[in-house]
Image (tube, rainbow, N blue to C red):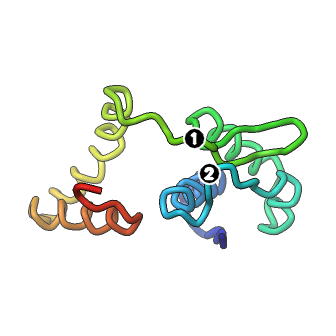
Amino acid sequence: MLIQIDYQSDVPIYVQLSNQIIEGIASGQLQPGETLPSVRAMAADLGINLHTVNKAYAYLKQEGFILIHRQRGALVRPDPMPEADEAFLGKLETQLRPLAAEAVCRRMDEAAFLEACRRIYRQFGYREGS
């Protein structure tokens, strides 16, 4: 999986890294149980501080996307993530709220907003009924 960091972005690097790893898991580019590069190796490959990688890995562990083993390092969670629950739905709504508000401010209609969400969601291979 190729990770690309936008050093000019307002999005913190650890968030960019976390988001790309989550996208890799969702798309199947990162398989359950697959080992991620060590903190040191990831930092060197991307040219970023190892504390930044540590922060991304800690977040991914906290959210349940990866496990960290002393000997094996960081690996993609080998079992499926728990299904969406009320807590996740609350988090989802909190994160979508500012995007929906901006879409309204930019006079984007609901159908176009929902279609953009649908298009992105489907990029990760999910289809209704699968």
Near mark 2 (Cα within 10 A), the count class, few <14, some 14-19 or many ≥20, is some
Residue furthest to the front: 130
- Nearest to N terminus: mark 2 or mark 1: 2
In-image side of 87 versus 66 (left or right)? left
Measured from the top left, where is residue 26 in percent x and y? 49, 57
In the picture of the structure, the residue carrying the numbered disc 1 is 79
Q: Secondary structure at mark 2?
A: loop
Measured from the top left, where is residue 13 in percent x and y? 65, 57
Measured from the top left, where is residue 73 in percent x and y? 83, 45
Q: Nearer the viewer, residue 17 or 33?
A: 33
In-image side of 18 versus 120 (left or right)? right
Q: Nearer the viewer, residue 5 or 29?
A: 29
Q: Which residue type carries mark 2?
A: Pro
Q: Residue at x 66, y 70 (%)?
A: 1
Q: Residue at x 76, y 38 (%)?
A: 68
Count of numbered labels shown in the rendering: 2
Q: Could you tell me which quadrant the C terminus lies in?
A: bottom left
User: Does 46 sit above or below residue 14?
Assistant: below
Q: Secondary structure at mark 1?
A: loop
Q: Residue at x 77, y 67 (%)?
A: 46
Q: Of the numbered discs in the image, which one, if any, rests on residue 47?
A: none
Q: Which residue type carries mark 1?
A: Asp
In-image side of 113 versus 7 (left or right)? left
Q: Of the numbered discs in the image, which one, if any, rests on residue 32?
A: 2
In terms of image quadrants, where is residue 122?
Answer: bottom left
In terms of image quadrants, where is residue 34?
Answer: bottom right
| Residues at discs 2 and 1 in contact (Cβ within 8 Å) | yes
Q: Nearer the viewer, residue 7 or 24?
A: 24
User: Does 36 sit above or below residue 87?
Assistant: below
Q: Residue at x 86, y 60 (%)?
A: 41
Measured from the top left, where is residue 39 in percent x and y? 83, 51
